[in-house]
Image (spheres, rainbow, N blue to C red):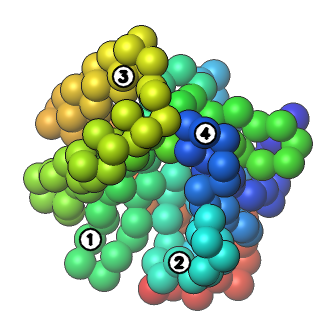
């Protein structure tokens, strides 16, 4: 069982089961009935093609076991930006937090304006990987649900909540320098 302070990895897959991206040095902040909250800063991210990079700013991530999206809140100098992945609900199997990325993304700016991204990639993979109609309906319905959460500024789309989790992250990971 995961507990606060545990260090884990994140593994993102595509519908055809190939690894899409992995992250290391992820700190568990909170586990609730349906949500896992983690934080990271300067984590190494490895892409499916072997290319790697390091995250530039602290992030608080929300994974759900009952929703078809996850949310990454990035604490940038100009404010909080949210990056939402339409994805399967997460699982944790003692190796990593795992989910399937379903291409569509929503970028939410500090003022809560937003933009839906990667519609072309979604359409391409929908046909290429033969997403079943039931899955397509779930993804498209969850996109609408996600947009409603953003418009209503419901958690996790709450800047104060993100800053509170960031303070928790810093307390757990002593020695992390303030931005």
Q: Are marks 3 and 2 in contact (CB under 8 Å)?
A: no
Q: Secondary structure at mark 1?
A: strand
Q: Which-is-in-front pick, marks 3 and 2?
A: 3
Q: Residues within 10 Å of mark 3 (few under 14, many from 20)?
A: some
Q: CA distance from mark 3 to mark 2?
A: 31 Å
Position of residue 151 in the picture relative to residue 10 (left or right)? left
**Where in the figure is residue 115, as x and y percent of width and height?**
16, 52
Quadrant (top left, top right, bottom left, bottom right) of the C terminus:
bottom left
Residue occupying the point 50% across, 43% down: 101
Which label's residue is closer to the chain start, 3 or 2? 2
**Closer to the N terminus: mark 4 or mark 3?**
4
Q: Secondary structure at mark 4?
A: loop
Q: Tell me the distance, in whole angstroms, between the alpha carbons under discs 4 and 1.
A: 36 Å
| N-term-proximal mark, 4 vs 1 | 4
Pick whichever of labels 2 and 4 is earlier in the sequence: 4
Q: Which residue is mark 4?
A: 16
Instruction: Tell me the element at label 3.
Output: helix
What residue is disc 3 on? 136
Residue located 56% across and 37% down the image: 15
- Disc 2/disc 4 C-alpha distance (Å): 26 Å
């Amino acid at each position: 069982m995961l507990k606060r302070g545990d260090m884990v990895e994140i593994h993102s897959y595509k519908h055809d089961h190939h690894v899409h991206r992995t992250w290391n040095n992820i700190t568990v902040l909170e586990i609730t009935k349906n949500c896992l909250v983690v934080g990271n800063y300067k984590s190494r991210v490895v892409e499916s093609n072997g290319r790697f990079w390091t995250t530039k700013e602290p992030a608080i991530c929300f994974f759900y076991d009952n929703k078809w999206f996850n949310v990454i809140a990035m604490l940038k100098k100009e404010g909080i930006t949210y990056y939402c992945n339409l994805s399967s609900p997460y699982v944790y199997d003692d190796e990593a937090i795992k989910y399937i990325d379903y291409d569509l993304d929503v970028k939410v700016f500090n003022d809560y304006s937003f933009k839906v991204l990667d519609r072309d990639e979604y359409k391409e993979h929908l046909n290429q990987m033969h997403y079943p109609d039931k899955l397509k309906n779930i993804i498209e319905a969850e996109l609408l649900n996600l947009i409603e959460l953003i418009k209503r500024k419901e958690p996790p789309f709450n800047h104060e909540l993100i800053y509170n989790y960031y303070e928790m992250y810093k307390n757990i990971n002593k020695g992390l320098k303030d931005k």
